[in-house]
Amino acid sequence: MHVADIDLQGFLEVHAKATIEARNNACPALAVWRQDIGPFDPAGLLRPLFERSTRTFVWVSPQTSVMAMGSATDFTHVGRDRFAGIRRGWEKTARTAVAGGPGARGVPAMVGGFAFAPRPGSLPEALMWVPRVLITQEDGRATLALSVCVDPRGTTPDGPARTVADATTLLAAAGVRPCPSPQLAGTNLVEIPSASEWKALVAHTVEQIRRGRFDKAVLARQLRVSSPCGYDLASVMGTLLDTQPGSTAFAVAAYGQAFVGATPERLVSLRGGRAESMSLAASMPRGATPAEDVCLRAALMEDDKSRREQKIVTATLRRAFEEVCDTVTVPDEPHVLDLPNLRHLHSRIVGEVADPESASVLDLVERLHPTPAVGGQPRRASLEWLGEAEPFDRGWYAGPVGWMNDEQEGDFAVAIRSAHLDEGTATLYAGCGIVAGSDPDAELEETRLKFRPMLNALAVPLSERAPYRRAECKDLD
């Protein structure tokens, strides 16, 4: 696209109206311009996006692509009411926002995510924002949304002309998919907890289940990967897009860090009063041959431990949906979800929201998170155990990541199969659902399988992936 293709004059008119709103209300007001653009390849925007902005958001699912650069305004909140706090902040802003342009109205307006638990960390426990430049593609239709926050005093550093220029430069720089990062020797890997400590922890958790403390707990491990050369976000995300089809690849870059991954698990989406979620649990590797693959697929469906684990998740999600939906549809039997490295049992849960006029996807996120697929069941008892047992804070691992539009509809995924990148260190996460009958050796192997997609994206040489080193005591602080 060229500068002339973006309607700067239309954006300036919207900006003028927002300026009046800001002065009349003595508070900042958003000016938003939307227009349709030609279709684009999300992978082709990765490199210019990450090179031109330190605040970025990427979301590429089988249904929707969202690429965002910069921030017009941030929403943060701390504490247990963080989801409601973000919603209140957005509603206050939306009351004075001025939007215009011929582009689609149902596209994302706000992007971001939440930590697993409401506690301080290297990234905020709740961070969503309205991007300055946001490009969305769904059902073959691509929309550009440009946003500026207008100060009531008239001092707006990022005005329409600059925002249009930044968007034009970004779109003009779209090119080929980024190449995978080269594999470099000298990578250092540290697992937390170590293999022996992990197996002891799984056994201890099974004993807690036997005693009736809870029915299921999802334990997580870290794998800290240090590289002498740092990490190229564009290449990492490009590899995830190429190697994890069917998953949602995501990236949140802020405060000099990035949280990235490719998750197969949807937390909840809300569109037109229709809510959807996914019960995802139990894992089994893919086979080395087609015949072995068929055999392992059947074995997963017939495995009693796996069926019990997935049933716990399904029942909990169904109950949550029934509290806010007139009708809820859940299949009688789970299906097998095949991924490149693993397969899982999953069930699609659909509900018609009872009051679509007042429903917000953030309310559903708050109600569902954390599901038994990443926390446990019962929720309180299992989370208490995780607080005692896990030797680290999860940060954004297994938290909700996604987007919301003007009507408070949206889509959020569970941020698993993920890593936190900070300069030359990547902290990978993998979790396992522990129920009665869980085998410590099998759970160890499952975590190592779940680390593989991110290790591949980070270009860690196969020769350096195992055995992992045991963490020193200082790593557990």
Image: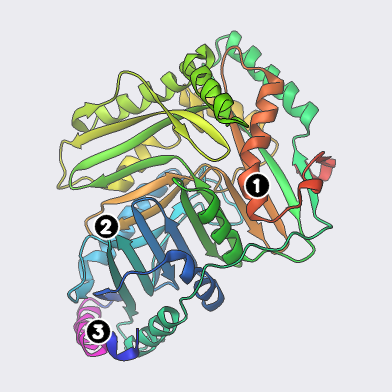
Disc 2 vs disc 1: which is toward the camera?
A: 2
Magenta span includes 101: no
Binning the other alpha carbons within 10 Å of mark 3 as few (below 14), some (14 to 19) or many (20 upward) gives many
What residue is shown with label 3? Answer: 11
Region in magenta: 7-25
Q: From the viewer's perspective, is residue 355 above or below residue 14?
A: above
In the current view of this chain or complex, which residue is farthest to the top?
211
Q: Is residue 277 above or below residue 126?
A: above
Give the main secondary structure of the magenta stretch.
helix
From the image, tell me which residue sits under label 1.
428
Q: In which quarter of the image is the N terminus?
A: bottom left
> How many numbered marks, from 0 up?
3
Q: How far apart are marks 1 and 3 (CA)?
A: 42 Å
Label 1 residue SS: strand
Asked whether, in this view, residue 149 is left or right of residue 375, the answer is left
Image point (80%, 40%), residue name: 468
Q: Which residue is drawn at 51% across and 19% down?
A: 306
Residue 115 seen by the camera: yes
Relative to 217, say whether 193 is above or below.
below
Residue 14 lies in quadrant: bottom left
Kind of residue at badge 3: Phe
SS class of the residue under badge 3?
Answer: helix
Residue at image point 73% right, 48% down: 224
Q: Kindly report which numbered mark, 3 or 2, lies closer to the viewer in this rendering.
A: 2
Q: Where residue 251 appears, x then y in whole percent?
A: 51, 58
- Give the mark, 3 or 2, whose residue is nearer the N terminus: 3
The residue tagged 2 is 139
In percent of width and height, residue 430 lies at 62, 38
Q: Which amino acid does label 2 sit on?
A: Asp
Was residue 24 drawn as part of the magenta stretch in this picture?
yes
Dot 1 alpha-carbon crowd within 10 angstroms: few under 14, some 14 to 19, many 20 or more = many
